[in-house]
Image: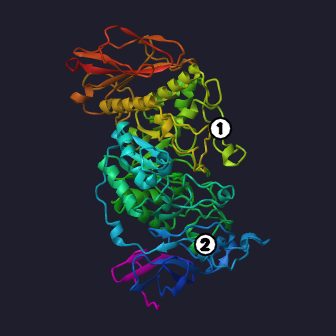
Amino acid sequence: MGYDISSGIPHRLGAIFDGEGVNFAVFSANATKMELCLYSPDGAHEMARLTLPERTGEIWHGYVAGLPVGTLYGYRAHGAYAPEHGHRFNANKLLLDPYTREWRGRWINDPILLGYDANSSAQDLSFDSRDSGRFVPKSVVSDPQMFEAITDRLGHSWEDTLIYEAHVKGLTQMHPGIAENVRGTYEGLASNAVIDHLQKIGVTAIELLPIHGFMNDGFLLEKKLSNYWGYNTISFFAPEPRYFGLEGIAGFREMVRRFHEADIEVVLDVVYNHTAEGDHRGPTLCFRGLDNASYYRLLSGQPRYYVNDTGTGNTVNVANPYVLRMVMDSLRFWVECMGIDGFRFDLATTLAREDHGFDMHGGFLDALRQDPVLAGVKMIAEPWDIGPGGYRLGQFPPKFGEWNDAYRDTVRRFWKGDAHSAQELGARLLGSAGEFDRGGRRAWSSVNFLAAHDGFTLADITQYAHRHNEANGENNQDGHNTNHSDNCGVEGPSSDPAIRSMRKRRQRNMLATLFLSQGTPMLLAGDEIGNTQNGNNNAYCQDNEISWLEWASADPEMTEFVATLSGLRKSHRVLRQSRFLHAARRAADGLPDVEWVDFKGHPLNWRDPGLSSLCMMVRASAEAPLSAEDDDAIFAIFNRAQTSADVRIPTAPPNYYWSVCMDTSNDALERTPIRTATISVEGPSVVALALLPEQSR
């Protein structure tokens, strides 16, 4: 079959079907020629190789009349192969279209994917002339009707948000309530069993580990492992096909629709900071072959090598306008065409770097803030990378929430019993104002968490003092070494009732702390059922029972407790305020918006080096206009001691009374008025009292 190719247009990148043919457009500033390769429906045979006839600026483009949707294709980019100058063009390597919305086939781990001869003494300065076409997936001309705009985003306020971090497969693979044929898929994720569970514990947003198209690392495949987490992106527009169910991409869109119907937002963990092509020894799959010097940040004076602020071998060059456009187009695509409600940016510091370093007013962050499509979308930063000055907690623009690892570490240290941790806990309970209260930012900016995918689960924080990552095949040298964990006397599982009770109480105490804190709470999937990874704190390569949630062993009492905590937070606005609390006195009643006292009711002595327990009274912010609902108050007691203590209760104002609304030592609560001046608080535990109007009895 012959194909006629005309000039086409450069305005829309990717392969765009218009009903009569397909316009192809791809960016490359340094290529000398760009070829479009068309493949047979099974992807096995190259049927035609057409030179894109036009170059407008840095966009190569052409139009093929009569080409249908579903056509498989790829690119071959011609140009200099001069790694010492930053160029790695090799037209023998078939390249994925950066804008493809789907691919067919699979990546085959083979040295033929390298642009150089792996056996040459010259290493990556050598050149490999073998055709990689049979070893790579093919880009697909998508049907535009598959990606019609989705307009039903929810837009929950940050103050009302409870995030649930989950893995598509890990959450569903072993769930008995999900049909076996859709376990591990997008469709299984949106099953009634999962949605009912999330609604029970009050989740308002599910944050998914990476689902952009990604690859397994070669070194993992050699060890018969795989990249389970997915932080190895190769396609920023295509959903990862390993999670497809019976309906493919339509199943992804249906998943989003079902979550929205259940009033749950969908947030994606996105990896725009690096790609799966790795360092100078990595394969040529897409960006490297199209224009290495444009897509990646290269070392000044040594462009053979890559800037490695990410720790993964390369760094995407979002300072390049067309690379920045690709990232922005990707974000808009996921919002407009896939219905996504927010993004968590992996290693966000990297994306905010300019030539002079991190800049909160840099090009990428400015582009995000001015984009009208992204205006109502949640943005969450992982505020660090491994580059110089990479730790940037609290330094992102007001639009962003930020993962607060300082919160995580402080809560773990406090309940483990570390000295001087009580003083820092006070700051963390109030949204980490020292880091975030600047430039008009809100208290929700602090995304508070106890555990995340990267590290111990909540159960393992109380079962293991040391990591146990032997299954990763790295001699247990990978993963965090400082976990602020404690095994409560025995490393690993224990049948001792006292140890098991101690561990469960500590988990409950940490969870209660999380839900009593100002900021945005985030739960790691499985923490609400007592899930364990058997001490593996870096399960990035464990696509097996180590990482999959073991629903058969779920702790229903823990689930009920999390539901209680979520309900408590939802019922009391003072626990989810947007303004920071600084003990300022409220104009309406002269009361401070937060008070700290000891168990005797005296002002807390923060200078006490032995401080280990405290009480916190939280009221509506002094900066907010008071309404009838703002008469709400919570008195929270944090008793870290191993023994019970008598705690003096503040005097309730006229026509109000105090009632215990949460006690980590007692599930069988009766919301009755407290008639005494003191209450006995078991240790260690957290107790919360709510101030209620007399008519609510």
- Image point (70%, 43%), residue name: 476
The residue under label 2 is which amino acid type? Phe
Cα gap from disc 2 to disc 1, whole angstroms: 37 Å
Mark 1 = which residue? 467
Check if residue 478 falls in the magenta segment: no
Estimate the x, y position of residue 312 in percent, counting from the top left.
62, 56
Task: Please provide percent x and percent y for residue 523.
Answer: 45, 39
Question: Where on the picture, by quarter, is residue 631?
Answer: top left
606 vs 345: above or below: above
Res. 622 visible in picture: no
Left or right placement of residue 500 versus residue 331 in this view = right
Q: How is the image coloured?
A: rainbow
The residue that mark 2 highlights is 135
Specify the farthest residue to the right. Answer: 121
The image quarter containing residue 34 is: bottom right
SS category of the residue bearing label 2: helix
Q: Quadrant of residue 339?
A: bottom left
16 falls in the magenta region: yes
Looking at the picture, which amino acid does disc 1 mark?
A: Arg
Task: Residue 530: tell me if it is visible.
Answer: yes
Residue at the left extreme? Answer: 695
Magenta-drawn segment: 1-29
Pick the front one: 361 or 335: 335
Q: Is disc 1 placed on a helix, strand or loop?
A: loop
Left or right: 552 as drawn, with respect to 119: left
Tell me, for residue 373, which label it has, or none: none
**Outermost residue toward the top in this view:** 676
Image marks 2 and 1: residues in contact by CB distance under 8 Å: no
